[in-house]
Image: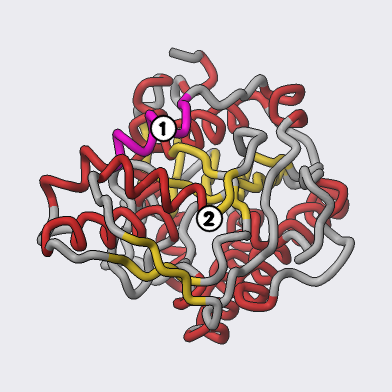
Amino acid sequence: MSAFWQGKRVMVTGGAGFLGSAVLRRLREAGATEVFVPHVEDYDLRTRTDIDRALADGRPDLVIHLAAVVGGIGANRENPGRFFYDNAIMGIQLIEQARLAGVAKFLTVGTVCAYPKFTPVPFHEDDIWDGYPEETNAPYGLAKKMLLVQSQAYRDQYGFNAIYLIPVNLYGPGDNFNPESSHVIPALIKKCLDARERGDSYIEAWGTGSASREFLFVDDAARAIVLAAERYDGRDPVNLGVGSEITIRDLTELIAHLTGFHGEIRWDPSKPDGQPRRALDTSRARERFGFTAATSFEDGLKQTIAWYEPTRGVAS
């Protein structure tokens, strides 16, 4: 419990989603009692009128902006225009209207996709402007990166307390397992479980398996966001991660093992690998607001599989 949250009104966009649900749990644990979630069925945050209505209804002192249109490599390739427009227009208007409404603090969750394609590993926050993002998700990454520009510009001109966090790929219970839009971990878990149940002798995996990724357990990400809301008021973007990477090949073999699939893994090099490597320098989060990830990768995967397996047919 933290005195910071006593009497504080909080609006969490995307609060019904994967990360948002974890953030709401963490906020309750921290002592927040006045939390407003503008559900997508009731508020279209791409429109100014609905943004104004949400701010009037929630009357927030603090906005945590998690809402986003997201997906894996395939979804990004199919929807570059939508992913750019929806994410940019939602964030830009929300920050502006929050400023005009007198919101005291605004926390934006960005994306690791904002980093240049060939960023030196580990990615440091100061490297974010040193090149163009990986092409398959550049429209999404750039749309979210513009919210960093806006946050810093508004801080400079208006004194608006806007902070910006950059999480790596998230995973955990409650993730999206729809094969049309899921990210790599839920996609592989579903693929391995389906193949195991059918008795298939192999599964197909995208790319060469040589690319690497870093993954952060969703409950750790939620804890980081709540800590930053409490303790961080700076202009600099801050990475959220674990500080280590795994190749997609090793990830696929690990998930196959944990799900009990013992068949062959066939790689399809005609499909894109995406960004060659992703691993973050996480020292700034530790130094600025005391965040260090606590969940081991294998334990997090086991929890994710254990959550998803009995829900199959419902969440898939």
Which comes sooner in the sequence, label 1 or label 2? 2
Between 130 and 39, the one lying in front of the other is 130
- The residue depicted at 80 percent of the width and 42 percent of the height is 235
Whole-Å distance between the Cαs marked 1 and 2? 14 Å
For the C terminus, the image quarter is bottom left
Of 184 and 211, the residue lying toward us = 211
Main SS category, magenta section: helix
Q: Which residue is mark 2?
A: 248
Q: Residues within 10 Å of mark 1 (few under 14, many from 20)?
A: few
Q: Closer to the camera, 101 or 66?
A: 66
Above or below, 129 relative to 226:
below
Q: Is residue 270 magenta?
A: no
Which amino acid type is marked by label 2?
Answer: Ile
Q: Helix, strand or loop at disc 2?
A: helix
The stretch drawn in magenta includes residue 301: yes
Say few, some or many: other residues with alpha carbon within 10 Å of mark 2 (under 14 / 14 to 19 / 20 or more): many
Q: Quarter of the image holding residue 163?
A: top right
* Tag of residue 298: 1
> Percent x, y for residue 308?
21, 47
Residue 109 in percent (x, y) is at 58, 50
Looking at the rendered structure, the secondary structure element under dot 1 is helix
* Residue type at the position of mark 1: Glu
- Please tell me which residue is depicted at 56% across the width and 68% down the height of the picture: 208
Horizontal side of residue 112 vs 301, given as left or right: right
Q: Magenta segment, which residues?
A: 295-304
Which is nearer the eye, 146 or 259? 259
Residue drawn at point x = 13 percent, y = 55 percent: 312
